[in-house]
Image (cartoon, rainbow, N blue to C red):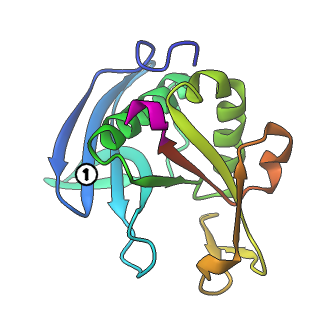
Amino acid sequence: MRDLINDSYNFEKIDSKPNKTKYEFLSIGNKKIPKRVSITKYPQPGLEQYYNLGFGNIFIVDGFESISDMSRDNNSDTDKVLKTVLTCTLDFLSENQDAIITFFGNTAAKHRMYKTQLNKNLEAINTFFIVKGAVLKDIYFLEDDEGRKYPSHDIDIDNIVYEIYNMRNSPLYNFITFELKTELK
């Protein structure tokens, strides 16, 4: 992510509500694949600053739109897609400066891939964001038939340990957070 913003696809904010903001862009590679980035506020008390970052491919079947975050078709542009997702995150945080974005893969393989991409581009990412790794104590994750991860029980926010993102510790992180750097607020 030599240059996070200039190496991103053009995107458009398509919806902005207090609890959810959506962006769209077009992944261009072997195919043209429409993508959606969704930043959603957590409803639980105590998480007022926290938003979940999700993204996936847009599909329209019989006139109905759906988003798939399980797609394995990366269109040979994984790095550019991730840069675009993070540029959308930067746009969101520029308007919601005290928000904290949580980011994780919905499968173990995707989570590893996202952390690998972050590790490769951490210097550029750190230009804009305070990045932290988080470990959930006293919890383990189960997988459904599609490989999606879910916690074994409710997450107690007091059992989350945060540290400034460290590449050596990245295999331990259950999720990653992004905050806008103080000098950019």
Q: Is residue 75 above or below residue 135?
A: above
Q: Amino acid at mark 1?
A: Thr
Is residue 35 found inside the magenta-colored segment of the image? no
Query: Against 102, is 144 above or below?
Result: below
Residue 144 visible: no
> What quarter of the picture does the N terminus occupy?
top right
Find residue 86 and report its horizontal and vertical position in percent.
Answer: 46, 34
**88 left or right of 115 in image:** left
Q: Position of residue 78 (x, y in %)?
A: 55, 28
1 horizontally vs 172: left or right: left
**Relative to 124, 164 lies left or right:** right
Q: Residue at x 38, y 43 (%)?
A: 57
Q: Residue at x 78, y 41 (%)?
A: 166
Up the image or down, 25 lies above or below 107; here it is: above
User: What span is in magenta?
Assistant: 180-185
Pointer 1: what residue?
21
Q: Residue furthest bottom?
A: 153
Q: Quadrant of residue 134?
A: bottom right
In-front residue for pair 26/100: 100
Give the residue at x 59% y 29%.
126
What residue sits 58% from the left and 13% below the top?
Answer: 2
